[in-house]
Structures are given as structure tokens and as C-alpha cells.
Image (cartoon, rainbow, N blue to C red):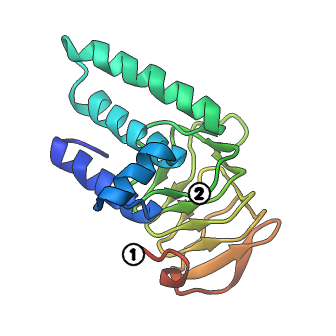
Amino acid sequence: MIQSKIDYKYYLKRDRLALRVKTDTLIAKIINILFPNQIWKFQRTMRKLEYHHNCKNKGLNKFHYLFLKYKFRKISLKLGFSIPINVFGPGLSIVHYGTIVINRNTNVGANCRMHACVNIGASGGQSEAPQLGDNVYIAPGAKIYGNISIPNNTAIGANAVVNKSFIKDSTIIAGVPAKVIGEVDIKTIIKHI
């Protein structure tokens, strides 16, 4: 969770690396102005809102905070994302536009790579939501729900339904219901770690 300006800058740097957004040359800056990456815009807005929510939402900063909330909601609706703040660690990479729904009680570690049509939520009216470790890859259409935990360095397969906890790191989880189907070197899937 972002607790200072230093954390805010670190999260932005890790997210930019995860999304492979280049901003170091003049040509890259011009391309970003002419053809803005909407997911990068979403993630920058989310991180800025997290920073202001956690650190700067008192006094006159409250007005800027409320403006950021409005801006975040607007871009979330445009892209089809229902992602609350303070859920993802640094290095988030949302690969495509499309429906993504995340429960506010979910906690996801660093370097998560996620595709469209992912749902992560509570089960049966419970308030507890999944807790995912670092370096987790979530393929399109995966459904993860309940009071469960997913270990570090895990790949979750397309359209998997994950409703129980797993313990072993560096595994591939897939199927309905999900089960371990093999091992994985997560660095082959999440390239920026």
C-alpha cells in the first residue's frame, strides 16, 4: 500500500515497467501524447488516487482527492474495470481492456499480470476475499473467489474457477474446479520481474 511520496513514485515506476511504457525519448513522449495508452492512464490515476487517499486527503487536498475519485470512476467505466484502490502491489500489468471485477477486500502482491474477464471476489455473502501472493499471472476469464490464498509465482489458467487455497509456489492452476496441473517458471510469463 502506498504510504508516502516515495512509495507512490516506486509503484508508478514498477507499473510502467510492467506495462512496457516507454517515456525516456522524445519520440516515445510524442507517441504517448498522440496515441495514449488508456490502461497506463488508468493505472496512473489509480496510483495517484491511492496516494491521495492514504496520505493527502485533508484540508484543501480534499478537493483534489474528490476530483481524482471522479476521474478514476470515469476511466474505470470507460475501460470496463471495477478495481478498487489499495488492492494491488507494485508492478501491476493489465493486458487488455474488458470486464475486470475485483472485490475491495482482495489483496494482491507485487507483479500481477492480468487479462480481461477476470473476477476476484467473496463467496456467498462473506466479506473475506482472496489473498494472492507476488508474481501471479491470471489468464483471461479466471474466476477466483472465497476466503482463499494463492501462493507466490503462480499461473492461473484461462477460465479457471479457483475456490480453494493452494500452498505450493511455482505452479500452474487450471480447470473447473481448479487444481494444480504442473509447475511453471513464472519469469517466462511475467517478463519484467
Q: Which amino acid does label 2 sit on?
A: Ile
State the image coordinates of residue 68 (x, y, percent, origin top left).
38, 24
The image quarter in which residue 44 lies: top left
Quarter of the image that includes the C terminus: bottom left
Where in the figure is residue 112, as x and y percent of width and height?
Answer: 49, 62
Q: Residue at x 46, y 48 (%)?
A: 40
Q: Residue at x 56, y 43 (%)?
A: 128
Q: Do the residues labelled 2 and 1 touch (CB within 8 Å)?
A: no
Q: Name the residue under label 1.
A: 193
At label 1, the amino acid type is Ile
Vertical comparison of 84 with 67: above or below: below
- Residue drawn at point x = 55 percent, y = 78 percent: 189
For disc 2, the marked residue is 148
Q: Where is residue 45 in the image (x, y as percent from the top left)?
A: 40, 36
- Asked if residue 47 lies left or right of residue 187, the reply is left
- Please tell me how many numbered marks the rendered image carries: 2
Q: Which residue lies furthest to the right in this view?
A: 176
Query: 160 left or right of 58?
Result: right
Distance between the alpha carbons at the discs numbered 2 and 1: 25 Å
Q: Where is residue 94 in the image (x, y as percent from the top left)?
A: 55, 55
Name the element at disc 1. loop
Which residue corresponds to the image point at 50% horizontal and 70% vertical from the top-left? 151
Q: Residue 138 vs residue 26: left or right?
A: right
Q: Can residue 90 be seen? A: no
Q: Residues within 10 Å of mark 1 (few under 14, many from 20)?
A: some
**182, 91: nearer the viewer:** 91
